[in-house]
Image (cartoon, rainbow, N blue to C red):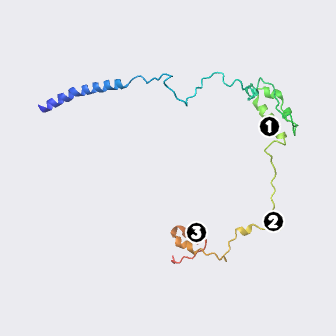
Amino acid sequence: KICLLADSLVSCLAPAVLVLLILSMRRQRKQPYIIDEEENIHENIVRYDDEGGGEEDTEAFDIAAMWNPREAQLVVKNRQDMLPEIESLSRYVPQACVMDNNVHNYVLAKLYEADMDLWAPPFDSLQTYMFEGNGSVAESLSSLQSVTTDSDQSYDYLTDWGPRFKKLAEMYGATDSSGA
């Protein structure tokens, strides 16, 4: 009879606990805390809703950058205080080709313009190097590969470093004192 009483007690308390849990969750779900603008004073808040700010600075930008290139006329921006060193090669590109929708012809014309402009970077040049050997400042460089066997440098300490340096000790001719 105790088991039946415990089962009925659990079956009655479980829904009651569930109802209490749901009610407590509803109470915690409140409206967000809203603060009036007068109460919310922060010195580091900056308002960015100003309309028309910066209109007085009309000389600091280039209006030509905003033009549609198809509708804009060709604006030449050369320095007025200096004459150009080389004449522009744009005359080689027919303007009809620019206004035409044939991109292939336009690219070919620009390629021709770039090929004809000898002063445009990158400057290609033939690199000539002096030969080594007799008459050269460096003399012969082949001596860099030769290994001198009469060196007074001893590499016997490499064998003391263990098996990890065995190959290095063999390369430098260190004698193996263990006889292996």
Q: Left or right: where does residue 31 sit relative to residue 174?
A: left
Q: Kindly report the distance in space between the C-alpha atoms of the residues bearing marks 3 and 2.
A: 35 Å
Residue 168 has which mark? Answer: 3
Q: Secondary structure at mark 3?
A: helix
Q: Left or right: where does residue 9 sit relative to residue 65?
A: left
Crowd rating for badge 1 (residues with CA inside 10 Å; few <14, some 14–19, many 20+): few
User: Disc 1 or 2, which lies upstream in sequence?
Assistant: 1
Vertical placement of 52 versus 141: above or below? above
Q: Position of residue 96 (x, y in %)?
A: 82, 26
Residue 137 has which mark? Answer: 2
Crowd rating for badge 3 (residues with CA inside 10 Å; few <14, some 14–19, many 20+): some
Q: Left or right: where does residue 9 sit relative to residue 145?
A: left
Q: Residue at x 75, y 66 (%)?
A: 141
Q: Nearer the viewer, residue 2 or 53?
A: 53
Q: Nearer the viewer, residue 34 or 95?
A: 34
Residue 111 has which mark? Answer: 1
Q: Amino acid at mark 3?
A: Leu
Identify the image quadrant of the N terminus.
top left
Q: Does the residue at mark 3 contact the one at mark 1 (Cβ under 8 Å)?
A: no
Q: Amino acid at mark 2?
A: Val
Residue 101's image quarter?
Answer: top right
Residue 51's image quarter?
Answer: top right
Q: Nearer the viewer, residue 78 or 136?
A: 78
Q: Does the residue at mark 3 contact the one at mark 2 (Cβ under 8 Å)?
A: no
User: Disc 3 or 1, which lies upstream in sequence?
Assistant: 1
